[in-house]
Amino acid sequence: MKLSCLIIDDEEIAARGVEQYARQVPYMGTIGVCSSALEAMDAMANNTVDIIFVDIQMPKFTGLQFLRSLKNPPLAVIISAYPDYALEGFELEVIDYIVKPFSFERFLKACNKCKEYFDLKNRSHATDEDYFFIKANNRIEKIMANDVLFVESLENYINIYTTQKKYLTLIGLNIIESYLNSSQFIKVQKSYIVSKSKIDSIEGNMICIGAHRIPVSRKWRDEIMADILSNKFLKR
């Protein structure tokens, strides 16, 4: 089954170049090419899109603004002539950031990251949701959801802290969030997801899990506290 991709770039030559590269990748299917973010919104409303390849500098609406506007964004790869936006891009949990000009080999590397993500996601969704798989330490690791203490985002990497060990993996926080049951886990700020049942105490704006101290977003604190306390997940 092919992954459906949409290319968004106001420079026609650059966009067609990406399209030609995508057509050479056996597992990629191109939905189309859009010259603006607004045009892309229309295309996404009428098609299932797995991956977007998006430029940053576009008229009226930049690629970064476009990504921020999406409630449930597809997997995103930024393709830009400007490397300065890489950090901001990874904060938006893009899976890769390609700097123009680039070779087919570099493009294929980004595509392989996308395919690996979907392979892992499909493997995890095929389970009974008691566990999921990630790639860490050059192998596929099985993680029991009940063993997870919390998840910490580090730009385009995340740390998964479990009762046994810590795993470092190249994947976005939103991807791991999709693996976890929302009745058992809660996002306490943009960089952390915690297991409600593993919370020992809450001190001010800090959640305590063993020796770990996890900051809680002041913006979300009341909502988070209501969620945790109403479900009686705090340990006694």
Image (tube, rainbow, N blue to C red):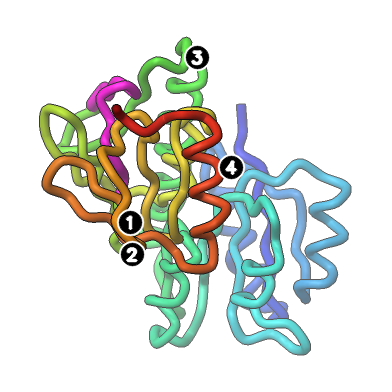
Which residue bears the numbered disc 3? 126
**Left or right: 93 as drawn, with respect to 28:** left
Task: Estimate the spatial distance between the alpha carbons at disc 2 and disc 4, rounded to whole Å.
Answer: 26 Å
Please state the horizontal and vertical placement of residue 215, each as a whole percent of the image.
32, 61
| Amino acid type at image mark 2 | Glu
Label 3, label 4: how many angstroms apart (C-alpha)? 22 Å
Q: Nearer the viewer, residue 65 or 14?
A: 65
Quadrant assignment for the C terminus: top left
The reply to whether residue 117 is in sight is yes
Residue at mark 2? 155
Query: Which numbered mark, 4 or 1, is in the foreground of this view?
Result: 1
The residue labelled by disc 4 is: 28
Q: Quadrant of the N terminus?
A: top right
Q: Which residue type carries mark 1?
A: Ser
* Dot label at residue 69: none
In this view, the mark in front (3 or 4): 3
Quick check: marks 2 and 1 in contact, CB under 8 Å? yes
Q: Amino acid at mark 4?
A: Met
Q: Which residues are magenta?
A: 141-151
User: Label 3 amino acid?
Assistant: Ala
Where does residue 150 sit, x and y in percent of width and height? 30, 42
Looking at the picture, tell me which residue is in the foreground, 117 or 100: 117
Asked if 24 appears above or below 93 in the picture, the reply is above
Residue picked out by circle 1: 153
Q: Tags 1 and 3 in contact by the CB under 8 Å rule?
A: no
Residue at 36% in and 19% down: 131
Q: Going from the N terminus, do you reach mark 2 or mark 4 first?
A: 4
Relative to 49, 226 lies left or right: left
Q: Is 167 placed left or right of 185 in the picture?
A: left
Label 2 packing within 10 angstroms: few (<14), some (14-19), many (20+): many
- Identity of the residue drawn at 70% across and 68% down: 69
Mark 4 packing: few (<14 Cα in 10 Å), some, or many (20+)? many
